[in-house]
Amino acid sequence: MEKIMPKPTRLPDRKPGWWIGRGTLLFLFIWISVDLFVSQPHSIREFDPTEVAQLETAMWRSYYDRKPVLLFWQLASGLRQQFHAPFWRSFTLGFQATKAAFVFKKGTSQLEYQKTLPDLITYYEAIQKLSTDSFNVSKVANLELEWWIVHRQRERYSYNDLANALGQTSAALYDQPAASFATYGRLRADAMRLCDEVRRHPGGATEADWQRINRELEQAWGSLHEVVRVPRL
């Protein structure tokens, strides 16, 4: 009697879209993994001051207009522009910065403000890993918190105090004399004062007000860039 051999099992046909989808997911997985875990340091001295100023203006506007999702996206864009953060890592850095800001926002005393420090240190440790320039992470984090406090407690501190605190923070970040950042500190403090003043107007800040704020910030970041930039040979 003739033995009937079983027919070989046939694998189901895969449509081209299936392979494209698998390939896309694999590419995305590799991209995110490399982006998050492989460091490609750049100098934090190299940035476009005009672009940074525009992003900061937009972030202030989104913050006061209570648009948190847009603010988070703008913050990530700012981190890519100023600190050369890779695309996906810019969102993890943005989350760390946002977390620190909200811990600070809830504080009402010096002791409560200090609870912000661990998040700020974690944030600046991540910036350090992205940078070819070294700085004292703890010192920069403490000075960052200091100018936040000075700006928050305007009944206690002046805008001159704020300008000095901003200059001290940048001096620590770029490891240069604080006197070099006096103009930057004054101009950025002036932009903050203008923002504080126009928001108290009936109806809040106008489009013209935001344009004035942006011009102030362009001058501030332009001044800082002139101080820290690496001369081209």
Image (tube, rainbow, N blue to C red):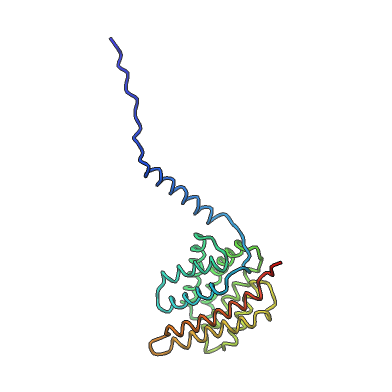
**Spot occupied by residue 123 in the image (x, y as percentages of width and height):** 55, 66
Residue name at image x 55 percent, y 89 percent: 156
User: Is 69 drawn above or below residue 13 in the view shown?
Assistant: below
The outermost residue toward the left is 1
Residue name at image x 42 percent, y 70 percent: 70
**Spot occupied by residue 89 in the image (x, y as percentages of width and height):** 52, 60
**Spot occupied by residue 165 in the image (x, y as percentages of width and height):** 61, 81
Quadrant of residue 161 within the rendered picture: bottom right
User: Is 176 drawn above or below residue 18 in the view shown?
Assistant: below
Quadrant of residue 157 within the rendered picture: bottom right
**Spot occupied by residue 174 in the image (x, y as percentages of width and height):** 65, 71
> Front-most of 44 and 126?
44
Residue name at image x 65 percent, y 79 percent: 181
Direction from residue 210 to residue 144 in the image, left or right = right
Residue name at image x 48 percent, y 84 percent: 195
User: Is 4 drawn above or below residue 149 in the view shown?
Assistant: above
> Front-most of 214 and 166?
214
